[in-house]
């Protein structure tokens, strides 16, 4: 167990797993956000399709459609630059977790309408990628969630613009110099 | 604990940044922007829902009932509910009835008005010849001219893409709110999909 821990710790200290997670999650979220911003009305329709906001609260629905793509861009940029890794990773993880129930509910609703296999359910989830198969979307979200959690708990701050971690690691990734024992 | 606090501060900063950027850019986007206070999905006006009457196109040989016989109030899926509810809200017409209206000389005379509820791109790619565009999501650009034309018309036939598209239903509700009488409004739910499937002509080009 100690050996495994030290292996994970050593891999983490290289900063490579974190860098991969940051670039993949950050880049993907920026790409999705740009697609949403290309047609904001279409994104508004998709948000409405989930029925999360009552029709009697148009301001809430419109605010989500206006702000959400920019939150994704802000988190994506923060992740890629490494300027607020924990905050952006936590926000993305929260968005992904919050997206599971409405996604599954909508897929189940279509599944009951159309019949067939659950994984054959295909619809535009409003994610910015057009129509997708539900199982591939769930798998994609799970991978993204895993990478976000990795970024959230990683102790390395290599290849980052700033550090948001209390550990005093240098930008080069060297370990903090131990405090001299008095 | 300091890490948790710092993470919370970072989340707050990111959310604030997104709010500022979102509303700022939306304000300068022009015609593609979302109107924050507008209800793009007006709910059904339950109190004003009449019992739908059979629709007969002028000159039609036989009566055509607007509601399919197999429409049941219960046991329907969400989308079926959505559209069956629209059928009880407005007079719906089939593609055959729409074709009959289209071929009627009254259409050329402007007595029957076809209204396309889709966006610029879809309208330009092909619409029912003579149909005027009224994009439900950019209503302010079209509503005046459409209301003017609808005032002179006896029947206003509203359609969109068909299938899962609900833009025509939403536009009918908006036209109702703009004082177009309910008995003038006819909903062609099959939309462009059914129109094209019946080898009917489509006109290409932007809205004048």
Image (spheres, helix red, strand yellow):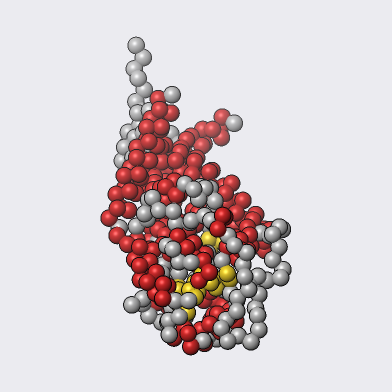
Q: Is residue B144 left or right of residue A98?
A: left
Q: Position of residue B72 (x, y in %)?
A: 71, 62
Q: Position of residue A128 (x, y in %)?
A: 46, 58
Q: Is residue B207 left or right of residue B174?
A: left
Q: Residue at x 65, y 78 (%)?
A: B64
Q: Position of residue A71 (x, y in %)?
A: 39, 46
Q: Residue at x 33, y 42 (%)?
A: B17
Q: Residue at x 52, y 36 (%)?
A: A7
- From this view, report whether residue A84 is shown above or below residue B204: above
- From this view, report whether residue A85 is shown above or below residue A65: above
Q: Position of residue B47 (x, y in %)?
A: 56, 54
Query: Does residue B26 show up?
Result: yes
Quadrant into which the C terminus of chain A falls: top left
Q: Residue at x 41, y 32 (%)?
A: B8
Q: Nearer the viewer, residue A56 or B152?
A: B152
- From this view, report whether residue A10 is shown above or below residue B29: above
- From this view, report whether residue A157 is shown above or below residue B81: above
Q: Is residue A35 left or right of residue B100?
A: left
């Amino acid at each position: 167990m100690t050996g495994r821990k030290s292996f994970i710790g050593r891999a983490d200290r290289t900063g490579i797993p974190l860098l991969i997670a940051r670039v993949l999650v950050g880049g993907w979220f920026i790409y999705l956000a740009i697609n949403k911003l290309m047609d904001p009305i279409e994104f508004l329709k998709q948000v409405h399709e989930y029925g999360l906001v009552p029709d009697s609260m148009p301001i809430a629905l419109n605010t989500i459609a206006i702000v959400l793509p920019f939150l994704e861009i802000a988190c994506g940029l923060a992740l890629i630059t490494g300027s607020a890794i924990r905050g952006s990773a936590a926000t993305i993880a929260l968005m992904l977790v919050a997206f599971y129930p409405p996604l599954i509910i909508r897929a189940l609703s279509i599944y009951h309408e159309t019949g067939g296999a659950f994984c054959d359910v295909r619809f535009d989830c409003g994610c910015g990628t057009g129509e997708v198969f539900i199982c591939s979307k769930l798998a994609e979200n799970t991978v993204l969630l895993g990478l976000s959690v990795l970024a959230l708990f990683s102790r390395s701050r290599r290849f980052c613009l700033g550090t948001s971690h209390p550990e005093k690691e240098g930008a080069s990734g060297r370990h903090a110099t131990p405090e001299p024992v008095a | 604990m300091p890490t948790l606090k710092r993470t919370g501060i970072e989340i707050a900063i990111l959310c604030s940044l997104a709010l500022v950027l979102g509303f700022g850019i939306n304000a300068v986007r022009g015609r593609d922007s979302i109107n924050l206070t507008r209800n793009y999905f007006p709910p059904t006006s339950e109190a004003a829902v009449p019992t739908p009457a059979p629709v007969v196109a002028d000159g039609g040989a036989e009566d055509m009932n607007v509601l399919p016989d197999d429409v049941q109030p219960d046991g329907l899926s969400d989308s079926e509910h959505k559209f069956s509810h629209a059928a009880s809200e407005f007079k719906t017409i089939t593609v055959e009835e729409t074709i009959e209206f289209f071929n009627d000389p009254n259409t050329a005379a402007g007595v029957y008005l076809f209204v396309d509820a889709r966006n610029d791109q879809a309208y330009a790619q092909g619409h029912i010849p003579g149909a005027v565009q009224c994009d439900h999501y950019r209503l302010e650009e079209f509503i005046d001219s459409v209301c003017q034309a609808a005032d002179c018309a006896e029947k206003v036939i509203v359609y969109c893409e068909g299938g899962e598209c609900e833009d025509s239903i939403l536009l009918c509700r908006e036209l109702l709110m703009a004082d177009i009488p309910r008995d003038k409004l006819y909903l062609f739910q099959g939309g462009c999909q059914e129109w094209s499937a019946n080898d009917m002509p489509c006109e290409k080009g932007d809205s004048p």
